[in-house]
Image (cartoon, rainbow, N blue to C red):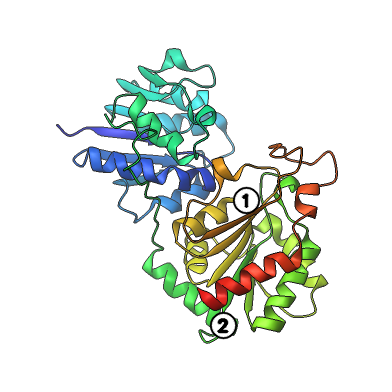
Amino acid sequence: MSRQVFIRSTNWIGDAVMSVAALREFRRLYPHDHLVLAARPWVAGLFENQGLVDQVISIETTTSRVANFKHAVAVARSSDRALLLQNAFGSALVALAARVPERLGYSTDGRKLLLTRSGLPRIKRLGRHQIYYYLDLLYQVGLSDRDYLSDSDFKPDIHLVPAPNAVESAAQLLADNGVVRERPVVGVNPGAFFGSAKRWFIDRYAALADLLIQRLDAQVLIFGSAGEREIADGIRGMMQCRPIILAGTTDLRSLLALISRCDLFITNDSGPMHLAAALDTPQIALFGSTDEIATGPYSSKALVVHKHVECSPCLLRECPLDLRCFDRIQVDEVYELAKTSLTHG
């Protein structure tokens, strides 16, 4: 029997990428259901043309919380089932207000009474990757009889494919900036929305980028959001060579396509780090305050650099001390890893 299923996406790019394996598994289990995924505008583009759902709708697009709530309720209405990947109380309230008969999610944020079936998060105590958080929800609420946390044969799939038109646009953008295929292309992502405790020092990014250009003839692209343009400009101001600044010029579709064109991606723990993992782009991920076991890049082509000091992982936005975890990551160490990746593949 075919159902209409309202799926509330997570709100941030990294979390959205880590939910892809659960969406792909849900699609496999219920191939005839009509899946409507509701997501915030800056995340919605991630799911388009991926074959994971039938429809992607942007919600919460105005400054009015009431209008946003009514819009989300309208999107959910007439659904037979709601799968709430977002943990907030509000998403469960939307499903209840829309009178969705089956409302499934974790009983977090005081919303257990709003759900018809719920689960309890258990990956933290089991030391598992965040990808399994969303997969385990399928098991706990009875959508799947497979216990993904104990099934060693199951391999989560978060693979994403950039849209063809975005790939064409990315190729043109790179050509316009003088990027050629004969020289290595290295993407650098020095920002992290969560806070400064997730960001390696900009002077070291600048020194690293100079080494990549001077010694390896690399073409360095500096990525980031519009709000991180200042970080990118700060790096360029410290450099002897000239990188290509793309911070503030990309949307999610073009970012996916551009990262897919990189021979190497060097990044802090961030949404773009997870995009690179989903695109199978070789990367070096630099970790400070966060835990690479839980939220590291889920890719065999990722190298993680994390100096485990006495206070890590603290999971704080801002370091109250001296960022000693990042201070121990040296430019030469990251350069040697980059050199090996670029010269040996």
Could you tell me the amino acid type at mark 2? Asp
Answer left or right for 95 relative to 222. left
Query: Which mark sits nearer the N-terminus, 2 or 1?
Result: 2
Disc 2 crowd, CA 10 A, few/some/many (<14, 14-19, 20+): few
Which amino acid type is marked by label 1? Asp
Residue 289 badge: none
Task: Choose between 202 and 8: the one closer to the eye.
Answer: 202
Q: Is residue 179 above or below residue 99?
A: below
Residue 236 x %, y %? 76, 71
Q: Residue at x 59, y 85 (%)?
A: 178
Residue drawn at x 74%, y 57% as measured from the top left: 329
Q: Which mark is residue 176?
A: 2
Circle 1 residues within 10 Å: few <14, some 14–19, many ≥20: many
In space, the residues marked 2 and 1 are separated at their CA atoms by 29 Å
Residues at marks 2 and 1 touching, judged by CB atoms closer than 8 Å: no
Residue to which mark 1 is pinned: 269
Q: Taking the image as drawn, is residue 9 in sight?
A: yes
Residue at x-position 54% and y-position 85%: 180
Task: From the viewer's side, name the closer residue of 226 and 208.
Answer: 208
Q: Measured from the top left, where is residue 31 in percent x and y?
A: 21, 42
Residue 241 falls left or right of residue 337: right
